[in-house]
Image: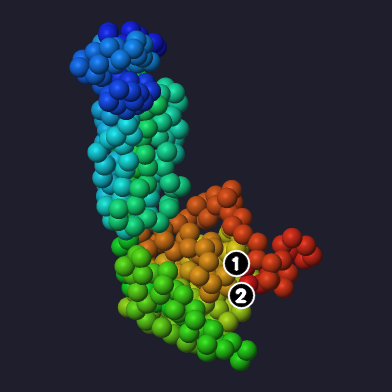
Amino acid sequence: MKFGRVATREAAGRIAAHGVRTDGVTLRKGQRIEAADALRLDQAGHHALVAATLEPGDVGEDEAAADLAERIAGANLRCAPPFTGRCNIHSGVAGVLLVERGAVDAINGVDEAITLATLPPFKPVVPGEMVATVKIIPYAVPRESLARASSVAPDPALSIAPYRRRRVGVISTMLPGLKEATVAKTLRVLAQRLEPTGAAIAADFRTAHDAASVAEALQEARAACDLVVIFGASAIADRRDVIPMGIEAAGGQVDHLGMPVDPGNLLLLGRLGDVPVIGAPGCARSPKENGFDWVLHRLLAGLAVTRSDVTALGVGGLLMEIVSRPQPRSGGDPADEDA
């Protein structure tokens, strides 16, 4: 592609690099210049323009953006019509965004003219939400660069894992100091979290805060639910605490306790057969985003969450400071049993 000043009388067929408005003639940036407009501008005394000229082997910005977007968009994604060298990619369903980071980095490393931006991996999205955009910086790119960008991207680089688990069981352990109003609010907050995913609370159990009672409730919940969330009257402090011991007593397995996300440190990840079990941290009683959300949405989408997945969440895992806490992280003892 050639770029620079040209005589207006020779500008027909080229692309206007800047907007021009004079004597009733309006050229928009990126617009192909018509012969009649070039003549009128020249007659009006506007004798030179900055323009781009496509050469053999060049691909126009809109075509290039659309081609690459279609190449990388996988299941449950749709590409909008391109405009000004941009093609936006939107989710077609509610679910979790899957991103091949290596592919995105590789595409962006091919040629400075070709860019791809996405939402963060595993971001919960709703139908119609824009999840990525391909932007071609100049007015055209060499076809060879476009081919290389397509070749380094796996098929697909982006996709949406739709929500699959719909029936959520909730177990609340009870101690004398825990108010019924707190449990009721917790259920309301969880129901609000689930609503965008199409899931709902299918079973609600209240049990004593001991391992045997938790195990009994888990066995009942397993038959009616796709996923179980346990809200303890007291936060989980150790693998030998009530909730992990209750999961094991029911015949389940504790995969990981703790996560490098704050708030959300005291989350437990386990399973009973093929039913995932989350031991919720205290912050999950709040509607504000916390580590519980990151795990919950992946599991609702049917994605595996392993110990290595959890331990990889530390970078970006400091979500916020809560100054109202009895022991805020900005000073004093950093421990917080409600994390």
In this rendering, the answer to whether 214 lies above or below 262 is: below
Q: Position of residue 308 (x, y in %)?
A: 52, 51
Residue highlighted by disc 2? 235
> 201 or 209, which lies in front?
201
Amino acid type, label 1: Leu
> 119 or 7, which lies in front?
7
- Tag 1: Cα neighbours inside 10 Å, few (<14), some, or many (≥20)? many
Pick out the residue farthest to the right.
Answer: 332
Q: How is the image coloured?
A: rainbow
Amino acid type, label 2: Ala
Which quarter of the figure is the C terminus placed in? bottom right
In this rendering, the answer to whether 159 lies above or below 202 is: above
Q: Which mark is residue 202?
A: none
Identify the residue at horizontal 41%, vertical 61% (top origin): 297
Q: Position of residue 256 (x, y in %)?
A: 54, 62
In this rendering, the answer to whether 329 lies above or below 68 is: below
Residue highlighted by disc 1? 266
Which quarter of the figure is the N terminus placed in? top left
Identify the residue at horizontal 61%, vertical 75% (top origin): 235
> 14 or 170, which lies in front?
14
